[in-house]
Amino acid sequence: MNKQIVTVKQGKLAGAVLKSALGSLYIAFREIPFAAPPIGDLRFKDPQPPQPWTGIKDTSQLITYICSQQEEVEPFKFFGNEDCLYLNVYTNSLNQSKPVMFWIHGGAFVVGNSSFQKGSRPDYLLAKDVVVVSTNYRLGAFGFLNLGHRVAPGNQGLKDIIAALKWVKENISNFGGDPNNVTIFGVSAGGVLVHSLLLSPCARGLFHKAIMHSGSIRCSWAMNQSLPERGFKLASLLGKDSCDPEEVVKFLRTVPAEDIVKAQASVLTREETLSHNLAFGINNDEVAENPVLPEPIEQLLKKDADVPVIISYTSHEFIMFMKDIGEKSLSIYNEYLPTHVKTLGTLKKLGDEEIKNLFNVVKDRYFEGKPIDKEKLYGLSNFMTDTFFGIPAILMLEDRVKRLTAPNYFCKFSYIGNEKTSTDLLVTRHISGASHVDDIAYLLYLPKCKTENPDPPAVGTKDRITLERMTRMWTNFAKTGQPTSIQDEFVNVNWKPATANDLCYLDIGNELCLLPLPSHLLSSKLS
């Protein structure tokens, strides 16, 4: 194996020359430490600088550092390690200055990783001549414990990502990347973290464009979920009943990581879980010694970075979360429909009377005024997709086009392909459609989804055409800030940014179509 040597601030690194799924060669530097291991007294603390090393650190071998978490399917086995603050750099050449694409994985703030084997690989994007970076960040309580006090103010995982971006700014030129042309992109919770970086004064200048797939802080499941009472409940579940933050943190530092991860699953009540809350997320951390979201999030939403963005969601996000369609599950959907409508109404601060009217509109528009049953699964998917993904994304777009000058591109991924995606690893699909994170299978090579067929989609197939369209538009955006700056046989449409007078979006289906954005449930006040 031909090793390539690069010098960074902490020392020398050896990377491996690998063959991509598309057949070309690239250089991989895997699991580079960007912060000190957050173990012992550093558990729950801000990331600290990495230690320098002597000699050459070998990043050509695969060790696979993954942050502590449990499997997403039964028996929910614990795996990973607290020593996990590592990033990967993938490049075609060390001596140029190419645009950098910085990937932030999703996973509800409690699962996921940037691992080469278990996470995602950059094979498809590297074919379009960019440098790709992917990073880990602490998950669950380790990354997002908020006790409303400086010893545990929340957002530790967000600070990890900022530390990784600072490392990129300092070192990426040694890998052939341009530190002044960095695009951050992420999916689901990763999309929320991208939006958080747009809001954080601490991240200014560390990136220049942003792409959010299926997640933003405006989503009800994203904002202010890391509540102090949930942190105190976690300690209580583990045997410490106290409302003293310093006492609780001191205790939690003595608890094995596996016990914390297992207890996290019981932090939410049944009602909170069925209402699609998350145990952890992003919060205002003004009590921190070094806050990254120093004002209420509602205020920071009006002060976001004025950089080009792509906001994206899929047409049937909710397929991934529709695990069961038995009578019991359908009765729960009927029982919780008023709760979900209220969640939707709070996105626009609707009053009780307006929410009552909204409920009637929802019943008519999505369910023909009837109870949810097996005949209404598309209506259910459409409503839940709109409530938890689509409408929050559109509200973000509507707000940004009024205030900012940088372009805002909006798209909906509706393509139904044959590539296996993360949804297929978690559930049986009960209806057809583009599910949560299906789009990522056409941007990144996903090893866990490619076990049966490791080959990329064959040239000439619809899947390959979609892959070519996605990777071309996303890398064009990273290079120039315009996704269709170059048009060819794959990208044959001019994707215009949305404006206050022209709220348009790109539908990515069998073809690419630029369409006017239709009105949504919160488009106007409900009388």
Image (cartoon, rainbow, N blue to C red):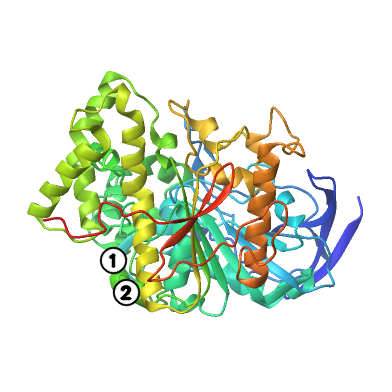
In the image, 434 versus 213, the foreground residue is: 434
**Are the two marked residues, 1 and 2, in contact with CB atoms closer than 8 angstroms?**
yes
| Mark seen at residue 523 | none
Amino acid type shown at disc 2: Val
Residue 156 at x, y percent in the picture: 45, 64
Image quarter (top left, top right, bottom left or bottom right) of the C terminus: bottom left
Q: Is residue 98 visible?
A: yes
Give the CA distance from mark 1 to mark 2.
7 Å
In the image, 107 versus 518, the foreground residue is: 518
Q: Is residue 278 visible?
A: no
| Mark seen at residue 148 | 1
Query: Where is residue 332, by image quadrant?
Result: top left
In the image, 51 versus 2, the foreground residue is: 2
Amino acid type shown at disc 1: Gly
Q: Which residue is mark 2?
A: 287
User: On screen, 315 above or below 14?
Assistant: above
Residue 277 at x, y percent in the picture: 30, 47
